[in-house]
Image: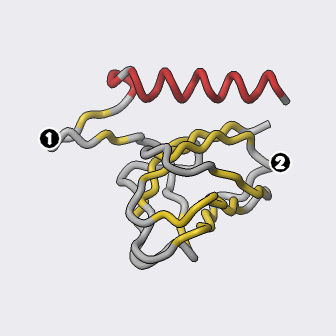
Amino acid sequence: MKKYLWVAVLALFFLVTHDAVFAQRPGGEKDFDGGLPPSVSACGTSPIVARGSNDTVGVITIGTGVVTACTITWASQRGAVPICFFQSTSNAVSLGFIQTRVSTILLFSAPLSGDRVNYFCLDD
């Protein structure tokens, strides 16, 4: 398990720091390209899944309100529970998560509103 976590951390670091991996849109927005986006629920008012996000990598903007959890439902059911890395862009709170093959519930140590969460997931 430790091996997969380090692979996920290193891969996310590479993806975030190397723009060549992404298609760059005119407004500077990164497109993660490839696959259908997950859906997000129970995540405040009007949460946003960034354009181009998919079951492997993406960004979710937390909706407004007092948000202490979010449910991400993956576009495709996986063969096994994925190995994922999640990071709040503000680093203001700790993130925990509960995963299944179909969805992930993010748990925040303090309420968030409007923050962004980056994710990177690998299939086992």
| Image: 89 above or below 112 | above
**Residue beneath disc 1:** 26
For the C terminus, the quadrant is top right
Q: Position of residue 118 (x, y in %)?
A: 49, 45
Residue at 70%, 23% (x, y): give it.
6
Q: Quadrant of residue 42?
A: bottom right
Instruction: Sort mark 1 into few (<14), some (14-19) or many (20+) by Cα contacts within 10 Å.
Output: few
What is the x, y in percent for residue 105? 68, 63
Tell me which amino acid carries mark 2: Ala
Dot 2 or dot 1: first in sequence order is: 1
Taking the spot 49% from the left edge, 50% from the top edge, the residue there is: 117
Q: Position of residue 36 (x, y in %)?
A: 50, 56
| Residue drawn at 14 percent across, 41 percent down | 26
Is mark 2 in CB contact (under 8 Å) with mark 1? no
Above/below status of 120 relative to 43: above
Q: How is the image coloured?
A: secondary structure
Residue at mark 2 to residue at mark 1: CA–CA distance: 37 Å
Q: Residue furthest left?
A: 26
Question: Of residues 27 and 69, which is closer to you in this image?
Answer: 69
Figure quadrant of the N terminus = top right
Q: Element under label 2?
A: loop
- In what element is the residue under mark 1? loop
Residue count near mark 2 (Cα–Cα under 10 Å), binned few <14, some 14–19, many ≥20: few
In the drawing, what numbered circle is on residue 100?
none
Of 118 and 24, nearer the camera is 118
Q: Is residue 95 above or below residue 43?
A: above
**Residue in front for this viewpoint, 20 or 69:** 69
Q: Nearer the viewer, residue 62 or 110?
A: 110
Which numbered tag is attached to residue 80?
Answer: 2
